[in-house]
Image (cartoon, helix red, strand yellow):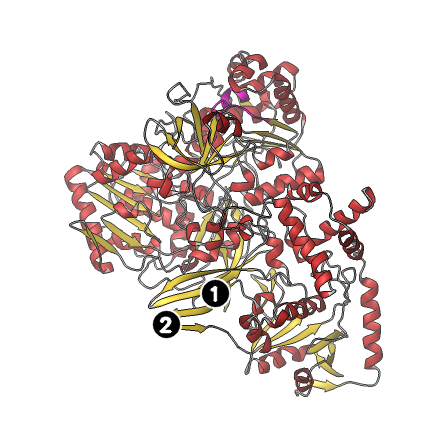
Amino acid sequence: MSQTLVVCPFCGCGCNFYLEEREGKAVGVTPSREHPVSKGALCAKGWSAYGFVNHPERLRSPMMRDHGIIRDVTWGEALDHVSTKLLEIKKEFGSESLGFLSSAKVTNEENYLLMKMARAAFKSNNVDHCARLCHASTVAGLAASFGSGAMTNSIEEFEDAEAFFVIGSNTTEQHPMIATRIIQAVVNKKAKLIVADPRDIRLAKWATVWLRHKVGSDVALLNGLMHVILKEGWEDRAFIESRTENFEELKNLVAAYSPERVAEITGVDPESLRKAAQTYATSKKAMIVYAMGITQHVAGTDNVKSCANLAMLTGHMGFPSTGVNPLRGQNNVQGACDMGGLPNVYTDYQPVADPKVKKKFEEAWGVTDLNDKPGLTLTDMIAKAEKGELKALYVMGENPIVSDPNAHHVMKALRKLDFLVVQDIFLSETAGFAHVILPAVTFAEKDGTFTNTERRVQLSRQALAPLDGAMPDWRIISEISSRAGYPMNYKSSAEILAEINRVTPSYGGITLERLKNTWGLQWPCPDEKHPGSPFLHKDRFKRGLGRFEGREYIPPPEVPDEEYPFVLTTGRVAFQYHTRTMTRRIPILEREAPKAFLEMNPIDARRLRVRDGMMVAVESRRGQQRLPVLLTSVVPEGVVFGAFHYGEANINELTTSAADPVAKIPELKSCAVNIRRL
Amino acid sequence: MKRLKKEKVLGFLKEMGNSATVYCPQFQAGKDLMLLPLGDSLYKGEIGKTTFAAKNILFPQSEETLSFMGKQISKVTDSTRTLVFGIRPCEMRAIQFTDRFMTRDNFIDPNYISRRRGMTCMVVACQEPPSDTCFCMDAGGMPYLDKGYDIQLFDAGDFYLAVSDSEQGEELLRNKHFEQGNEKDEERIEAIKRKAVQSQKNRPGTKRAIEILKDGTPDKTFWERLADKCINCGSCVYVCPTCTCFNVFDLPLEGGFMRYRTWDACLHAGFTKETSGHNPRPTLGSRLARRWEHKLKYDVINYNESGCVGCGRCSDACPVGLGAVDIIKEVNRLAVADPV
């Protein structure tokens, strides 16, 4: 029996626990009491995190599709085939025809290697991952406003906040350990809570003001708040003058968002709007907290910029318990972005198009001719695949068929590929389409670092030997890259981290030695003397002055009409994790949320003559799905809600791939549907 | 009565390690105190409140219970001999409580009992509460035990004073690492006990809470109001030394199936949900009520003893302040507001 300190494999909170091993298997967890996030507790998922590690359905051998039949092959055969095939396709169609999806579920080191392989071995910048579907708009929006697209403050700082503005985050379900800080601050320290959400989420119960705005009307709501703040003189003049630019433009823009007009667009009454504006603006330490409800819209980047505008307008920036706090949904989605798992940047967001950066990486990697043209985003890769322009896709630990919008379109695109490689721990829906399947290992079977939502880079230690037949992702990538003519001879994950330290300014001081003796370090941490950065933009924004970028409200791409009279919005539940490849194999979690459902307001149900539990057909312009109805006033009239976890009743067959023009994040939060009684 | 010098503890435990798996409190990662198998590198002689009590050893988070190989069905039990050093009196009371629960009505839990039979318990009495959430005396216990342990140790500075309450314990005291004490040791123990009792200041009002719950059921809104904070994580249940509910499931093995059981939490809706979909405890508030009425009401009715030993682990763990200390205080407040 042994206990090994690891980082939780689920959400971006980044809890630490000791994984208990007995006879080579993961059998339990003990939360760390001293860890700044877990503090002796875990959420329901964390408590069960050992449960999928030794599941009998783990992939144990590489597999190849041969004339439609999948057969087990040796590692040698699989690796040779993958490298040869990728080189062939590159030779025939060019490096632009190759796509690589890195993963928010694997370590920083592995993400670094995948993007290095894509760029150095195959000269392709077509590297992206599912951050495209969650916080691409954060990265784009906050980079424009502040110069850095990450959570500005820290989880511990929630405990001292005087006010929270939670918009588009169902925090108790998706980031439970962060939600507990909010609840505790409200209950014990009388902090004020503003919740803006179309759904009556659990946090709404604790809200000083709950703004039930219409799905997709966030920009109008935020502009309305700013309108009131400016009208009442609650803005922070000194901050605006000394720290920001472009204020006049914002002022002129929000002038048109009177509470009455905002009420028309959002459905929020002027009095509540005013109360929310006052509560947020007149509290000294006020934090904006948001997640997918802000980002997963065609107006995602606009939403993010508007949140940034609000924080800057009131001077809630640059000191503890303030800021703009996007909550990241996966244990390493922050890290996957930091490591350059994005089409336009290397690590630490160094642009591929910058000649100096290009030269730096050519020297560091010992290559010439790195591609300086930004590559394709995940959404564009799928679109190009459908057109036959993208020929090969290498997917590491992602399941786009369930996670991406418009699943029929994704499946059609994947079928068109000449070559699809999927590297995963279970046979995911996407792996079912692959030409080659490479069995990787779980978090428990490798060393490496993960970066949580508050930019805390943490060491996770190997607790178990790799499952027989499976290999850590970083080894698989090294093997393929070496075979493709760009040798990678790393002996350990630690060697890769040392290289990351050298080429990544924000990770410069985040060395293995330091991580071994701390609960992690928060970037930026440029050198080994630097203590790390609990909050950002202290006296100066990363970009110098914070930039107000006022945005106009644009309606969602699909609004209800006669044919499709309901708004469908999607989200998650506390007991399942994303596309469920892990949590469906943990009996307690699966028991709690075993099947897909459609939340519907009882008033709508009465009109449609639908009872609780009854199956209905939900139809959009892209597909249809049968789902049992869950009657609840959590959703307002005219809105239905489904969780996207369930591949067998895939709600993403209904959603639209209409995307934000800047960040290419799809509109996963809103589409028009019709509901038919069966 | 014997003495065990503190400097000899490690030697003694190592010797015990020849015939049993020895568990004692050790710091993991230099920071978290946990009850772990003895390892040279981690042992610092620390005594305190470990994250889990010995429950994690007797009733592990997940375990195999039955194997089905063709027509062959066999029990899987573990009778490893273990010695647990450094658990606290409240934890020993929790083991006594669980012993009774796992054998009630002649229904023997084979997995628990086989491990329990192989376990020797060496308790270290508390001189002062190991943490500010401890409330053993309020919960009907004492910072030391009168009976039901193998060996109980009292901290007398450089050495422990050791008494036994079982044949096994008596035999252990004959081990060469223990030394003969002197005639004043009895008195020393009494003095330590008196001091320990005086140091127990945390009084949330368990007895009163039990009385209140015995006489009536609080309004439903009472529990629902508390549950508004609960995030349904199960931490309070999992760290509780007397909570032993479990879930059962089968997984395929080569040539058959294995039945597993894992810790479960009554706060989860699926714990009571019936096949029809009906749930007799449909809300979080009703499940919170179930959990606390179980401990403070029905255990008292059934066993004449509350299911809470006052270790305070749930209060340490709960991220929203709904541990025993808080719940008991809330129930007491209820009485003030609305006398039953």
User: Callout 1, which amino acid?
Assistant: Glu
Q: Residue at x 17, y 42 (%)?
A: A89
Task: Identify the image quadrant of residue B120.
Answer: bottom right
Residue B246: % across, % down: 54, 60
* Residues shaded magenta: A211-222
Residue that mark 2 sits on = B71
Q: Would you place residue A248 above or below residue A13 in this image?
A: above
Q: Residue at x 51, y 74 (%)?
A: B78
Q: Would you place residue B318 above or below residue A672 in this image?
A: below
| Residue A308 magenta | no
Residue A261 horizontal side relative to residue A416, left or right: right
Residue B152: % across, % down: 72, 76
Residue that mark 1 sits on = A21
Secondary structure found at label 1: strand
Q: Nearer the viewer, mark 1 or mark 2?
A: 2
Visible in this render: residue A535? yes
Around disc 1, counting alpha carbons within 10 Å, would you say few (fewer than 14), some (14 to 19), or many (20 or more)? some
Visible in this render: residue A40? no
Q: Nearer the viewer, residue A75 or A141?
A: A75
Around disc 2, counting alpha carbons within 10 Å, would you say few (fewer than 14), some (14 to 19), or many (20 or more)? few
Q: Residue at x 47, y 52 (%)?
A: A511
Q: Which chain letter matches label 1?
A: A
Q: Nearer the viewer, residue A245 or B300?
A: B300
Q: Which chain letter matches label 2?
A: B
Q: Are marks 1 and 2 on the same chain?
A: no
Residue B62 horizontal side relative to residue A62, left or right: right
* Quadrant the C terminus of chain A occupies: top left
User: Callout 2, which amino acid?
Assistant: Lys
Spatial separation of the CA atoms under disc 1 and disc 2:
30 Å
Secondary structure found at label 2: loop
